[in-house]
Amino acid sequence: MPVDMKETIAEAARTLLMEKNKKKLTVKDIVDECKITRQAFYYHFADIPELLRWILERETEKMLKDSQALGDPEQSLRYFFLKAINVLPYVKKGMQSNYRDELERLLTQNIYNLFEQVIDSGNLYRNNTRLEVKLILRYHSQAILGILREWTDEDTNNLDTIVRQVYLLMTGKTSPLG
């Protein structure tokens, strides 16, 4: 039952950000939306950043599991982009809230963790040192965030080309300069 309440609280936060356009998400707003007590909120989450972290971690775990089931790294990357495009409205609303810095840090860390697991499971960069792999991961995580920050309808129309180029860059099969 605790997971169900966590999901209820998470859904209330999403509703407040997306449907009710809350710029300043507060525990009071969330508990009012859920019709629970503050104590119930604090039983499940220490604060709103922990709630955001929980939401992102759950979504990342699900995304990783689903993308690994595809078996093909390029298709997994395409799946990641499709999921990211679908949650962009939530992320953009969250970035307008008073938790922008925390959300950006969490997104960066979750993208890094996701790509780290993909690299590990795909046995990529096995000829590189761990330090080099960490630098590669940081680079690609920031690049993906940059691409998503500036995402356009034209990008959605060219998704397959973008995925192919990002995949080739990530696997070292082409240079950024062509």
Image: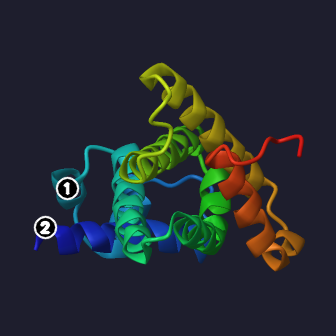
Depicted 77 relative to depicted 136: above or below: below
The quarter of the picture where the N terminus appears is bottom left
How far separated are the C-alphas under marks 1 and 2? 7 Å
Q: Nearer the viewer, residue 96 or 176?
A: 176
Q: Secondary structure at mark 1?
A: helix
Callout count = 2
- Nearer to me, 124 or 146: 124
3 with respect to 123 (left or right): left
Residue at left offset 50%, top offset 38%: 125
Q: Quadrant of residue 164?
A: bottom right
For the residues labelled 1 and 2, say whether their Cβ atoms are less than 8 Å apart.
Answer: yes
Q: Which residue is mark 2?
A: 2
Horizontal side, residue 172 vs residue 109: left or right: right
Mark 2, other Cα within 10 Å: few <14 / some 14–19 / many ≥20: few
- Indicate the secondary structure of the residue bearing disc 2: helix
Q: Position of residue 159 (x, y in %)?
A: 76, 73
Q: Residue 132, image x and y in percent?
A: 53, 24
Q: Is 42 situated left or right of 110 in this image? A: left
Which numbered disc covers residue 44? 1
